[in-house]
Amino acid sequence: MNVSAVLKDYIRKELMNGANGDLDESENLLAAGIIDSLGILRLVSFVEEKFGIEVPDEDVTIDNFQSVKSMTDYVAAQS
Amino acid sequence: MTRRFLLIMGLGILGVILNHSATFGYQATFDLAWRYRPEVAASCEDLTPPVRCPNYDQVHSATYWGLTAVRRFIAFGVPVFLMVSGYFIAFAAGRKDARIQWPILKVRVVGLLIPYLLWSVIIFVGQALFYNRVYPTAWDYISRLLIGGATGSYYYIPLIIQLYLLSPILVPLAKNHWKWLLVGTAVLMLFVEGLRYLQLFGIGGTAVNTLISFTPLWFFPRRLFWFALGIVFGFHISDFKPFFTRHKNKFVYGAVVFYFLSLVEFEVLLALSGQPWIDFFSTYTTTIYAGLFTFALLSVDKLKLPMTPQITDLGAKAFGIYLVHEQVLELVGTLMFRYTPWLLGYQILYQPIMIFFALAVPLLLMYLVSRSPAKKLYKYSFG
């Protein structure tokens, strides 16, 4: 499974409401206004369900979730 | 616990809808009883609109207890929203650096402001067209926009914006001096809410009334505690998890006890006030109940609620629902008042109708926009 592509697809569909604009792997999702308080909760929930991993609360950090790349790296490290 | 927040947000938005629907229910039961009870209408001095003929003989009826039980139960709604927003600020600040960056705050504030302004303007236009409610000057509109005055529940948006703007100060405190921060903000909240007790019994006179006028719902001191609590949870989640696990039974039983105490306290206050009716406010027991209930939800590991996926989905759409639901309640309530006034006397029917539309119409609007060419505007419409 291409983690990066799955994450991009989810973010585009669910958090950007189908916007077609480019989503750079390293784009800061917070600074771009793509994830907010609900957005981060939804992302964590999606990552857990889609990739079958449990994200401990301690791991819900900006380092792990601020971009598609950081999330991809995090998922890879957990798998 | 992070995922649990989404479920709690879903419960929170359901609670907000139930709360506001119950408010319309009180209005139907007391202020509008003349519309469906001929004996009440006969006792009114003047039935020329707008009719002001409240009737409180349904206080302590089955209808009253039903509405009151629901309204007290859902007292956790807004505190939960504020806690989740605080939790997000801790996330955005980064647990190591504990510094929130202004560009991130700016994006969040703009993300809240645009849908808020859009819906406020829609509401002002709707009020002018359908209710003939027009304010005389531009300043009347601007001042209402500044304090969330387009509709009752909009106070939340100026409030959360203030809290976000305060977060550069709150973040280091939450990281390094969290106990002092929680104690300080709790004392502030209890002091501000305590003023309402004094006012109720006519203690303190002008000084108390002045202080109350300086602490409306949209101003941060009244709800700062819940936001600060969310930031503290975010920074110290590892410390709080064993605390929640250790005390989960106390939270569950405490929530049940304080729920009933909040019902009793209000009845005592109503009786002592000597008035036929007093406005609800966040009494001390209600505030404690709201905290204990939220802690109980966070601490019970294997919490299985019916329709958890659906409630979680509502949590994800909470802001959009929040922006739209109250106008739907007003519209549906007005239609029932005009065309089926007898329904106002049957809250067991009135409430499900109100709640259904207050939930269904925002969800339908969000669905339609997200699947139309206007989907690019979704973010600016529903957050």
Image: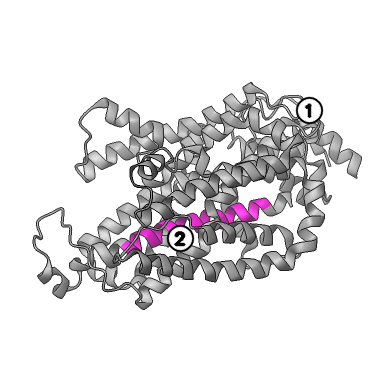
Spot occupied by residue B155 in the image (x, y as percentages of width and height): 43, 41
Spot occupied by residue B361 in the image (x, y as percentages of width and height): 42, 52
Residue at (52%, 44%) from the top-left corner? B319
The question of residue B188 being in magenta is answered with no
Query: From the viewer's perspective, is B11 left or right of B239?
Result: left
Neighbor class of circle 1 (other Cα within 10 Å; few <14, some 14-19, many 20+) is few
Q: How many marks?
A: 2
Q: Quadrant of residue B289?
A: bottom right
Considering the numbered disc 1 on the image, is that residue within a helix, a strand or a loop?
loop
The question of residue B9 being in magenta is answered with yes
Spot occupied by residue B187 in the image (x, y as percentages of width and height): 58, 46
Chain identifier of the residue bearing label 1 in the image: B
> Looking at the picture, do discs 1 and 2 lie on one chain?
yes
Marks 1 and 2 close (CB-CB < 8 Å): no
Query: From the viewer's perspective, is B100 left or right of A47?
Result: left
Kindly identify which residue carries mark 2.
B18
In the rendered image, the residue lying farthest to the top is B103
Q: Which mark is residue B62?
A: none
Q: Quadrant of residue B228?
A: top right
- Residue B286 seen in this snapshot: yes
In the rendered image, the residue lying farthest to the bottom is B62
Q: Which tag, 1 or 2, sits closer to the chain's start?
A: 2
Q: Nearer the viewer, mark 1 or mark 2?
A: 1
| Chain part drawn in magenta | B5-26
Amino acid type at circle 2 is: Leu
Amino acid type at circle 1 is: Asp
Chain identifier of the residue bearing label 2 in the image: B
Q: Is the magenta stretch mostly helix, strand or loop?
A: helix
Kindly identify which residue carries mark 1.
B97
